[in-house]
Amino acid sequence: MAQTPLLDMQDIDIAFGGVAALKRARLTVAAGEVHALIGQNGAGKSTLIKILTGAYRKSAGTIRFDGREIDFRTPKEAREAGISTIYQEINLVPFRSVAENIFLGREPRRFGLIDWKTVQRRASELLESFGLRIDVKKPVREFSTAIQQMVALARAVSSDAKMVIMDESTSSLDEREVELLFTVVRRLRDDGRAVIFVSHRLDELYALCDRVTVMRDGQTVAENAMQDMDKLKLVTTMLGRTLAAVVHEDSAVKEANLAKRGPVALAAQGLAAGAKVTDVSLDVHAGEAVGLAGLLGSGRTETMRLLFGADRPAKGALSIGGERAAFKSPKDAIARGVAYLTEDRKAEGIVPELSVRDNLTLVCLPALTKRGVVDVAKQREIVDGFIESLGIKLRSPDQPIRELSGGNQQKVLLARWLATHPRVLLLDEPTRGIDVGAKADVAKIVRELRDAGLAVLLSASELEELTAVADRAVVIRDGETVAQLDGAQMNETSIMDAIAYGAGERSALVEAVQSTARGSER
Ligand code: ADP
Ligand code: MG
């Protein structure tokens, strides 16, 4: 950037409850540019924006905006300084008219009174210049999200906002609406204003943005011209992996597993629910482990919840062992042999005050109970059996589970589900937050379960952990299945490639890698 940037945020820190959410984060944006701010869910994008706009207070760092150092204490101060923010939840007044919303607080007046005629005429003219012809006298709540976004943008355009921030504001729009919005964004840019554009839809960024800042784990990890970052580089930067770190997998073993797997145990066709899952198709055979890959926020957890009946799909079909399944609740799924280890061990998994014994038998307890009496001998047999077979380290089964290490808690939760004799095992991030030794144990257990004939579907944000265990991978992006990679075709590079390019395109890199691999096989 040649001239002084309009916005210069340096070394920004903030913590929530002692946990650092931003660590020396940076963001610089010039006037007249559309700047992409990207990163996986939880990377810190919204937090950085909230600090800029006075919604949160930073604990360290400096912010310069429009030539002076600033530290806004309220969103109002930021607005008055010329920063206009459009969140996903739009901050308009729903029952007021479109025209009122555009000029709220800045209404043109005649003889001290609001000149409604002028308000309406100017609002209509402004929206028409965006190609939008609507009745500006109607309340905004009567219009679609897309139009509400346009109204919010019109408000920014008509005010003297020097910077407009759009945080994930396209996530609920369809293609045509996005295109319309882009036209307005480009106009703002051509007016010499700056736009910060947060989106997880990579394709959009190339169509719109001039420069990009990538965040990961609360830090700024890359700042670049958009054209100097191809999609694969964006994805690897977001994930924090380099191509050099890609390990070679023993694909022969995976191929052999796939050759001897059983029939389809679980199949989903065109699943959709809400905004997070739009079109997921996958199947898992008995005796194979399938990795569900995708960025954080791509819809993996939401997909697993649908497969387990925790949420109900709006569209699509599900089958278990070749028979149609329509789960009304997890109870139905459990009855059909589906088990689900949730991603959030603390909130949804363990009951901290209960003993290991009670935690382990929580789901299978009804089967051990006759006329209100628990078969204690049978319960002990199950508990001792799993402690032994999974190598759970503890003092006593009567010990509260909270006293166990994360890895051992995870094994207890796994045992809880195995005690229900499932056919299908859904494991959401089973290796997250546990130590290296426990990770290896979990991987080994998953392989043994697969070899015993279970159908395993597992997710892991660490691609290395995913490819180590899975025989093949289903890749989802923005709630949609974009690729299926089998055995020899599945590795960290091909998964990242699918995340970056989706189903249609393939990078030259992967083509090259694969043709080399094919060549060496001959
Ligand atoms: P992004 O917008 O990139 O998805 P966020 O900025 O929303 O990420 O979140 C970054 C991190 O800060 C996350 O770990 C999130 O849980 C945490 N965080 C954000 N806001 C709060 C808050 N008000 N209280 C506690 N933690 C928060
Ligand atoms: Mg966010």
Image (cartoon, rainbow, N blue to C red):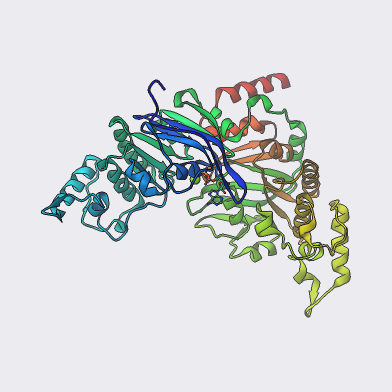
Which quarter shows the C terminus? top right
Quadrant for the N terminus in the image = top left
- Is 307 on the left-hand or right-hand side of 423? left
Residue depicted at x 32% and y 50%: 148
Q: Nearer the viewer, residue 497 or 394?
A: 394
Percent across and percent down for residue 93 are 32, 57
Left or right: 96, with 355 as reference point: left
> Can you say whether 108 is above or below 186 in the image?
below
Residue 510 appearing in the image: yes
Front residue of this view, candidates 60 and 146: 60
Q: Is residue 107 left or right of residue 316?
A: left
Residue under the point 50% across and 28% down: 223
Image spot of residue 252 (x, y percent): 76, 31
Q: How many marks?
A: 0
Residue reaching furthest to the bottom: 371
Q: Quadrant of residue 82?
A: top left
Is residue 503 something that shows in the picture?
Answer: no
Query: Left of 476 or right of it: where is 491?
Result: right
Q: Position of residue 155 (x, y in %)?
A: 28, 46
Give the answer, above or below, for where 117 lies relative to 170.
below
Quarter of the image where one finds residue 137: bottom left
Residue extending farthest to the left is 111
Residue 78 position in % (x across, y down)? 37, 44
Please tell me whether residue 389 is drawn above or below residue 368 in the rendered image: above
Q: Residue at x 29, y 61 (%)?
A: 95
Q: Nearer the viewer, residue 388 or 406?
A: 406
Which quadrant holds residue 471?
top right
